Image (cartoon, rainbow, N blue to C red):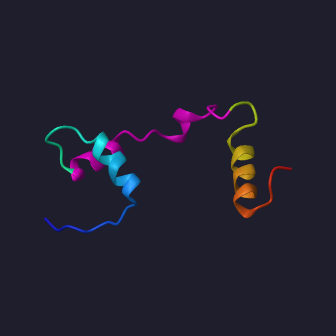
Amino acid sequence: MSSRNVAVQRTVYDALKKEKRAGESFTALFLRLLNQRGSLDEVRGAWGSSGLSEDLRRLAQTRRGGGSR
């Protein structure tokens, strides 16, 4: 089995460590979390009436410094 080092911020490490179950390795934790991911179909509508595409457009604008329009 090969391994890789991954650098994460301390806050991320602390959050992952809290999520880790007793006796669970970080590898097992990552696999468990990855298997829990839902599909977009499962979360459709969670963003309210404006829809996902509108919310993503606003988020992209905000990150570019454009604010909301």
Q: Is residue 44 magenta?
A: yes
* Residue found at the far right of this picture: 69
Is residue 63 shown left or right of residue 27? right
In front of the other: 11 or 8: 11
Is residue 42 shown left or right of residue 24? right
Q: Percent x, y for residue 55?
A: 71, 44
Q: Residue at x 20, y 67 (%)?
A: 3
Q: Percent x, y for residue 16?
A: 33, 47
Q: Is residue 32 magenta?
A: yes
Residue 49: quadrant of the picture: top right
Q: Residue at x 86, y 50 (%)?
A: 69
Which quarter of the rendering shows the N terminus?
bottom left
Residue 47: quadrant of the picture: top right
Is residue 25 shown left or right of residue 34? left
What is the chief secondary structure element of the magenta stretch?
Answer: helix
Seen in the picture, residue 11 relative to 51 is either above or below; the reply is: below
Seen in the picture, residue 52 relative to 5 is either above or below; the reply is: above
Residue 50: quadrant of the picture: top right
Is residue 9 shown left or right of residue 4? right
Magenta residues, start to end = 26-47
Q: Percent x, y for residue 42?
A: 52, 33
